[in-house]
Image: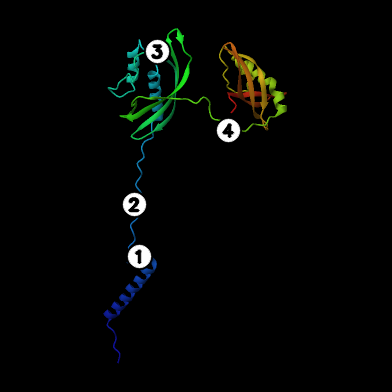
Amino acid sequence: MPQDEKSGAVFARRLGRGVLWGVLILAAITGVRSWVIPTKAPAPPPAQAQTAPAYPEAEAQAVAARFARAYLSWDETKASERAGLLASVLPAGADAAMGWDGRGRQDVVTVQPGKVTPGKSRQALVRVDVLTRAAEAPAAKQPARWVGLDVPVVETAGRVIVTGRPGLVGIPDTGPKAPDLPIAQADPDLSTRTEATIGKFFGAFAAGDVESVTAPGATVPGLPDGIAYKGLSSWAVDAGSGEDRTGTAVVTWTLGGATVEQVYRVELTQVSSADAQRWQVADVRGGSL
């Protein structure tokens, strides 16, 4: 005759089954593989590359320009003055003569700093173009000439200084060949209708009073005294449409005892009044761009 199980055995069996089902459900949710092969810890983010601070090109150009002006200026009666100017951009204790034999005379008209080529250890080479005028004697000036100067510099202790003697280099006689640039098509009709307006504007431009010939709200400073308007050589409005148009003017000026022809881009805007519409100048800039 079957005997009833004790309540403890029944409870243990049911508990075991519950645990087993719990394990199976957990395995289905998390995956058995994650129990056998532990999840890898996330990889640390890659270390940030330490980049060197940008080279102080503006300061390097300024220092090289100061150096070039003092270095290529000499007067045997003012040697100490030149040495003092050079010392301000040289390392402490450097030879401020910088290879000069202390003779002759040369003046610097202007300097133009250019390309900065960084090197190792915060060094750089700065190209400076210098316009010089040599003179054997004060009354016998030689023609001015451009010459290039490569100036070595280094950034140290928060400053840029010249590290040593520079070298003279040549300057090309001409620039490279210009690329083929697009040429705007002209609007012959509008060009003809606005030619008198443009001529009147440039006459007022030379006189220094353009308020009466410019569009409302336009701000176009006039030219200084000593420049006279000789004539409008050509005027062409670019093809297009709308109330704002742009054209190219070729203008002849008289100044310094000579005549010179120059190019301007002129912006026109159509201004309406109660009884008419007219074109007026809104802005002007030199060059053909």
Q: Determine which quarter of the picture holds residue 55.
A: top left
Residue indicated by mark 3: 105
Residue contact at pointers 4 and 1, CB within 8 angstroms: no
Q: N-terminal of the two: label 1 or label 2?
A: 1
Kind of residue at badge 3? Arg
260 relative position to 276: left or right: left
Q: Which quadrant: the N terminus? A: bottom left
Distance Cα–Cα, label 3 vs label 1? 87 Å
Q: Determine which quarter of the picture holds residue 264.
A: top right
* Residue 149 location (% of width, % of height): 42, 24
The residue most toward the bottom is 1
In terms of secondary structure, where does tag 4 sit? loop
Q: N-terminal of the two: label 4 or label 1?
A: 1
Kind of residue at badge 4? Pro
User: Quick one: 25 or 117, which is closer to the camera?
Assistant: 117
Residue indicated by mark 1: 34
Q: Is residue 262 above or below residue 28?
A: above
Distance Cα–Cα, label 4 vs label 3? 42 Å
Kind of residue at badge 2? Pro
* Residue 244 location (% of width, % of height): 64, 29
277 relative position to 38: left or right: right
Residue indicated by mark 4: 179
Distance Cα–Cα, label 4 vs label 2? 51 Å
Residue contact at pointers 4 and 3, CB within 8 angstroms: no
Residue indicated by mark 2: 44
